[in-house]
Image: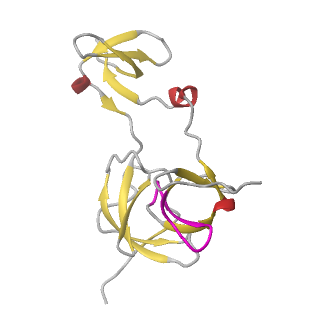
């Protein structure tokens, strides 16, 4: 059995993992590679037998995750739909959810539907999380309990409308009083 050989820039995944990483350097004296996760930027070293090439999702799967837009209909109600094409005037063709009706809108008249998100700084790194509207405000202190050690985070912004936020914050909001 020949060992896999990866090139710098290849997108790989750990054989037991789920998150893709990019090969950034090969260690010359052994069969290891330095890689950087696409989602977090964290780096790791792994042997060639611990890695495999990452297969990008096929177009069928990608089609299932279309961007959802909200828009105002002629009767002044709010509708939701997906972009299915663009006409010759650069207007979006939107297929309304539930009715399959096609509407035509200027892109400026559409609002992308995103989860409510906030950003928090922890150990000098800013990360975005999904939250419930109104549950936090800028400057709140949080206790992050998901890692191996609890850490303090500070909310730096709310309602950030960040597409990259994928998880809820695991922890507690701290109530502080001056001493």
Residue occupying image coordinates x 69% and y 60%: 49
Tell me which corner region of the image, top left, top right, bottom left or bottom right, holds residue 14: bottom right
Task: Give the side of residue 130 with respect to residue 52, left or right.
Answer: left
Q: In the image shown, does 132 or 31 lie closer to the viewer?
A: 31
Task: Give the side of residue 115 with respect to residue 108, left or right.
Answer: right
Residue occupying image coordinates x 42% and y 30%: 67
Tell me which corner region of the image, top left, top right, bottom left or bottom right, holds residue 128: bottom left
- Residue furthest to the right: 1
On-image quarter of the N terminus: bottom right
Vertical comparison of 9 with 114: above or below: below
Residue 35 within the segment the image draws in magenta: yes
Q: Which residues are magenta?
A: 23-40
- Residue furthest to the bottom: 179
Vertical comparison of 153 with 129: above or below: below
On-image quarter of the C terminus: bottom left
Q: In the image shown, does 62 or 20 lie closer to the viewer?
A: 20
Tell me which corner region of the image, top left, top right, bottom left or bottom right, holds residue 85: top left
Residue 69 within the segment the image draws in magenta: no
Vertical comparison of 37 with 104: above or below: below
Q: How many numbered badges does the structure rendering display?
A: 0
Residue occupying image coordinates x 29% and y 68%: 139
Rendering coords of residue 100 (x, y %): 47, 11
Rendering coords of residue 11 (x, y %): 52, 50
Residue occupying image coordinates x 44% and y 53%: 131
Task: Give the side of residue 165 with respect to residue 59, left or right.
Answer: left
């Amino acid at each position: 059995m020949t060992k896999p050989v990866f090139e710098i820039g290849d997108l790989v995944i750990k054989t037991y993992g789920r998150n893709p990483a990019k090969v950034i350097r090969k260690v010359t004296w052994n069969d290891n590679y330095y890689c950087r996760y696409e989602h977090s930027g964290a780096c790791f070293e792994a042997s060639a037998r611990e890695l495999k090439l990452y297969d990008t999702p096929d177009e069928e799967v990608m089609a299932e995750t279309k961007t959802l837009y909200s828009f105002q209909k002629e009767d002044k109600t709010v509708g939701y739909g997906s972009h299915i094409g663009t006409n010759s005037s650069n207007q979006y063709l939107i297929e309304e959810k539930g009715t399959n009706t096609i509407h035509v809108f200027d892109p400026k008249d559409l609002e992308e539907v995103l989860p409510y998100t906030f950003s928090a700084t922890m150990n000098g790194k800013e990360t975005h999380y999904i939250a419930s509207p109104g549950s936090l405000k800028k400057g709140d202190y949080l206790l992050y309990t998901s890692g191996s050690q609890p850490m303090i985070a500070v909310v730096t912004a709310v309602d950030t409308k960040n597409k990259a936020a994928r998880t809820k914050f695991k922890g507690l909001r701290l109530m502080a009083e001056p001493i």
